Image (cartoon, rainbow, N blue to C red):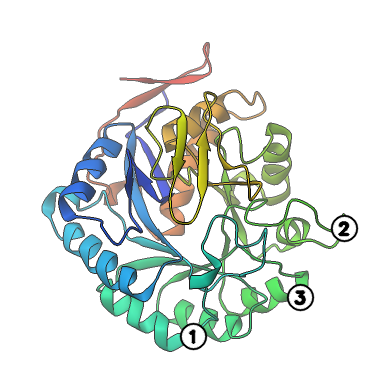
Amino acid sequence: MLTVPGFVDLQVNGYLGVDFSSPYLTEEDFIRVTRALLQTGCCGFLPTVVTASEETYQHVLPLIARVMKKKEFAGRILGIHAEGPFLSSKPGAVGAHNPEWVKEPAIGFFRQMQEWAEGNIRILTLAAEVPGAVELTRYAAENGVIVSLGHQLATAEDLANCAAAGACWITHLGNGMPNLVDRHLNPLLAGLAEDRLDAGIIADGHHLPPQLVKVMIRAKGVDHVTVVSDAAHLAGLPPGRYDNAVNKIVLEENGRLHNPEKQCLVGSSATITGCVNVLCAIPELSGEDIVKLTLDNPLKMLGLTRNDLQDKAPAFQWDEASRSFIRC
């Protein structure tokens, strides 16, 4: 019998209208939506802070670190994912991030971010082709941080250089790149070919078509792919238009979350459990495969096991007949 305590998500930007990268984030709101998220079947996650102003980092990183100290969230909030600010500022590659806040990779500023976070940044996403990327990769990896490459226009050589310096993951492979690229020389194919980099993918049914999900898993192997939700702060809210200072966002009835003007997705409206349901509809994936992609592989990436989770009791059981995980 295949049972799991839930699923682990390495990339959650917010939930129920609360943005983890907002300068107005409060400890009360962060705790409230964290509790709600943990009720969805997510048994561990990394709150993700995207490209933001220095003042915002100085506000949100210590706030998240304080909440992590609470006994209630030990083994549940598993660290912080800093997605930026060391990304490409080019259209397409920057995606929904604000290019005005993008910085060139700098060890000094990352060290300051880590101090604000009280050492809790576990994953750092940066663009491999930007000057200083290799140096920051080496520094972060030597200090126990998982370096992931994404939101980039990187060549195969750029990825290889960062992989040699200690990078080991790709942030949402196939996304965070322009809609139109060279058909052979592009970050997607280069990422698939670089064996030293495991792949993170968003399996919400909108970021990647199912046939591409299959190709990615076949290319990397099921042991080297981790599914994330990339849940935006609008996840869990009803369809509608939600504009902010950076993006004009439309949440469609089918869950697609996008900026029609920029022609890009703006994160996901799904939770990791919603992504599990998408994976269940791919007949080539077994229940064991899905558990690797959404529980064991993300834990392995963090150097953890199921024993490190606070929630260990079986919560979901795989039902072969319906090809779904059913709450116990």
Q: Position of residue 49 (x, y in %)?
A: 39, 61
Q: As shown in the figure, which amino acid type bears the numbered disc 3? A: Glu
Compared with 34, 186 (above or below) is below
Q: Nearer the viewer, mark 1 or mark 2?
A: 1
237 relative to 167, above or below: above
- Residue 307 appears left or right of 324: left
Residue at 57% x, 66% y is: 168
Task: Name the residue beneath numbered marker 3.
Answer: 157
* Left-right relation of 161 to 327: right
In the rendered structure, the answer to whether residue 111 lies left or right of residue 280 reads left
Label 3 vs label 2, nearer the camera: 2
Residue 154: assigned label: none
Q: Are marks 1 and 3 in contact (CB under 8 Å)?
A: no
User: How far apart are the alpha carbons under marks 1 and 3?
Assistant: 21 Å
Residue 279 falls in image quadrant: top right
Q: CA distance from mark 1 to mark 2?
A: 31 Å
* Local SS, label 3: helix
Q: Amino acid at mark 2?
A: His
Q: Crowding near pointer 1: few (<14 within 10 Å), some, many (20+)?
A: some
Dot 1 falls on a residue whose secondary structure is: loop
* Dot placed on the residue nearer the N-terminal end, 3 or 2: 3
Q: Earlier in the sequence, mark 1 or mark 2?
A: 1
Q: Quadrant of the N terminus?
A: top left
**Residue 106: image tag:** 1
The residue drawn where x is 25% and y is 42% is 33
Image coordinates of residue 35 in percent, x first then y, are 22, 40
Residue 184 tag number: 2
Give how far apart the Cα atoms at labels 3 and 2 are.
14 Å
Would residue 298 be seen by someone viewing this image from the given angle? yes
The first of marks 1 and 3 along the sequence is: 1
Q: Kindly report which numbered mark, 1 or 3, lies closer to the viewer in this rendering.
A: 1
